[in-house]
Image: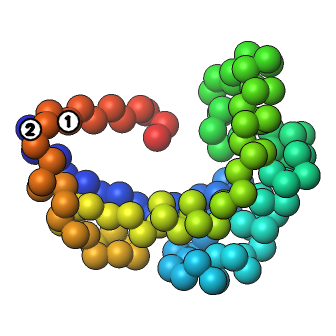
Amino acid sequence: MRFVSNYAPITKVIAKGCFYSHLRLLEVMLEDDKRIMMQTAYDTKSYHLLQQIWDALIYVHKKPEADRYEKYLEDRTTQRNLAASYQALNTFNISSMHNGLTEGNNKIATIDIPIMIAWGEND
């Protein structure tokens, strides 16, 4: 099986139509207003704000049951390394192609096991 990666950098973060401008450097991302707002929402356990964001971006068509949603919120608000996570997602590239931020290192070619790709209609 051949796998072709076309990882796009993480761009849509806060709300529809609100995009990161491909922030390359962690230092720049640490100062980004959208990242600061999200980290503040996590740090202050602003469940209502987080739920509004997730409903607009993630749970557009189907929301989790209320008790499960609450557990997701509790777990998510333990995150302390949001900027580093965003930066890792932006720069991780094991493909053979440039992803818009980082040249691929072609490590995908060293994977020697079957790979299944599942792609949902709204991914």
The residue that appears at 69% across and 76% down in the rendered structure is: 30
If the image is split into quadrants, where does the N terminus sit? Answer: top left
Marker disc for residue 115: 1
Give the residue type at disc 1. Answer: Ile
* Front-most of residues 123 and 89: 89
Residue 80 appears left or right of 19: right
Marker disc for residue 71: none
- Give the answer, above or below, for where 75 lies relative to 41: above
The residue that disc 2 covers is: 1
Quadrant of the rendered image containing residue 65: top right
Give the residue type at disc 2. Answer: Met
The residue that appears at 77% across and 58% down in the rendered structure is: 38
Residue 74 appears left or right of 93: right
Of marks 1 and 2, which one's residue comes earlier in the chain?
A: 2
The residue that appears at 29% across and 57% down in the rendered structure is: 6
Are circles 1 and 2 on residues that touch, CB within 8 Å? yes
Secondary structure under the numbered disc 2 in the rendered image: loop
Q: Position of residue 27 (x, y in %)?
A: 63, 83
